[in-house]
Image (cartoon, rainbow, N blue to C red):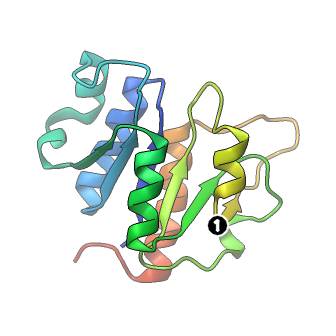
């Protein structure tokens, strides 16, 4: 089923929220290090509540390590970005997609952006910049799970 991938997250509360989401929906979160905080941060624990123990978290020490694993497994990277004209609602998700979320402060570097198999965006008003990364992840994961019939029973 689709997994979430966090590229060097900056904000522990967003990571905790996404881990809680993944625990509730029985999905895995891949975290590409380094994170901008210690993974035992109180804010992450508060946002994740008591769900963190149930969350499937896979840590990748670097983007290179993650990319090698991803190539080995043959999985597709779908980047959520504001730099795309392709709406997530018009995208055909596959059950083993990796939904890549960039850093809250900087997104992903150009080489990571260019290496993605697909780039999608959430339609928004033109006078707004972006959504919170946890909210964006939840919106797109829900659509991917709907399309692939991947919600837990």
Q: Which residue is drawn at 67% across and 74% down?
A: 91
4 and 137: which one is in front? 4
Check the image and report above or below for 153 versus 121: below
Provide the secondary structure element on which disc 1 rests: loop
* Quadrant in which the N terminus appears: bottom left
Looking at the picture, how far across and down is residue 39, in whole percent? Answer: 27, 25
17 and 74: which one is in front? 74
Q: Callout 1 environment at 10 Å: few (<14), some (14 to 19), or many (20+)?
A: few
Q: Quadrant of residue 150?
A: bottom left
Q: Residue at x 24, y 17 (%)?
A: 42
Taking the image as shown, residue 129 lies to the left or right of residue 30, namely right
55 and 110: which one is in front? 110
Looking at the picture, how far across and down is residue 140, in whole percent? Answer: 54, 60
Instruction: Single out the residue that lies furthest toward the right.
Output: 126
Check the image and report above or below for 80 versus 12: below
Looking at the picture, how far across and down is residue 26, in whole percent? Answer: 24, 62
Taking the image as shown, residue 117 lies to the left or right of residue 42, namely right
Per the image, the residue denoted by label 1 is 117
């Amino acid at each position: 089923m689709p997994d979430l991938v966090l590229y060097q997250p900056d904000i522990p509360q967003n990571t905790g929220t996404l881990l809680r989401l993944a625990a509730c929906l029985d999905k895995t979160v891949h975290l590409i290090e380094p994170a901008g905080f210690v993974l035992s941060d109180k804010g992450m624990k508060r946002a994740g509540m008591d769900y963190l123990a149930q969350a499937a978290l896979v840590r990748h020490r670097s983007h290179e390590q993650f990319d090698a694993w991803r190539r080995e497994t043959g999985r597709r990277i779908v980047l959520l970005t504001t730099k795309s004209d392709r709406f997530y609602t018009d995208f055909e998700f596959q059950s083993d997609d990796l939904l890549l979320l960039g850093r809250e402060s900087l997104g992903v570097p150009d080489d990571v952006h260019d290496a993605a198999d697909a780039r999608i965006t959430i339609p928004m008003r033109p006078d707004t910049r972006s959504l919170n990364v946890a909210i964006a992840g939840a919106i797109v994961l829900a659509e991917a799970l709907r399309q692939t019939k991947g919600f837990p029973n």
